[in-house]
Image: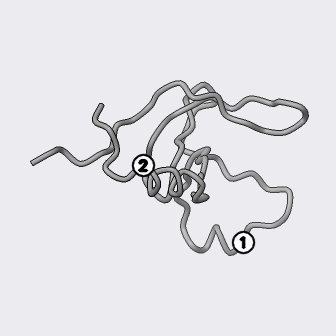
Amino acid sequence: MTEPKNPALEKMLMDVPVRVDVVLGEARIPMEELMALSPGEIVALERQTNEPVDIYVSGRLVARGKLVVTDGQLGVTLSEIIDSRPEAA
């Protein structure tokens, strides 16, 4: 690993908040069915309960993980880190 060219800039960037989204799954249903949904109905997702969830940072897939409950809140345990950096030219 190379040393940062500007350590002060790197330190400042480490404090920048980023959006993290955990995607449980997706569903594709016709608009007619979507418009007919009412409270209490279930929309089945295209993912099994034992499959890992996708973790996105600022819209980019970076990891997969397993849902957990900690202190009464949902969380995610990372199970796979995805290297989505562009290849060096």
Vertical placement of 77 versus 25: above or below? above
| Residue located 55% across and 38% down the image | 47
How far across and down, in percent of the image, does residue 75 sit? 73, 36
How far across and down, in percent of the image, does residue 61 sit? 44, 47
How far across and down, in percent of the image, does residue 48 sit? 58, 32
Q: How is the image coloured?
A: one colour
Q: Earlier in the sequence, mark 2 or mark 1?
A: 2
| Residue located 78% across and 38% down the image | 74
Q: Nearer the viewer, residue 48 or 70?
A: 70
- For mark 1, give the secondary structure: helix
- For mark 2, give the secondary structure: helix
Q: Nearer the viewer, residue 59 or 28?
A: 59
Q: CA distance from mark 2 to mark 1?
A: 55 Å
Q: Please indicate whether residue 10 sits to the left or right of residue 65 in the image.
A: left
Vertical placement of 79 versus 6: above or below? above
Extreme residue in the left direction? 89
Q: Quadrant of residue 4?
A: top left
Residue bearing the label numbered 2: 7
Residue bearing the label numbered 1: 36
Vertical placement of 1 versus 88: above or below? above
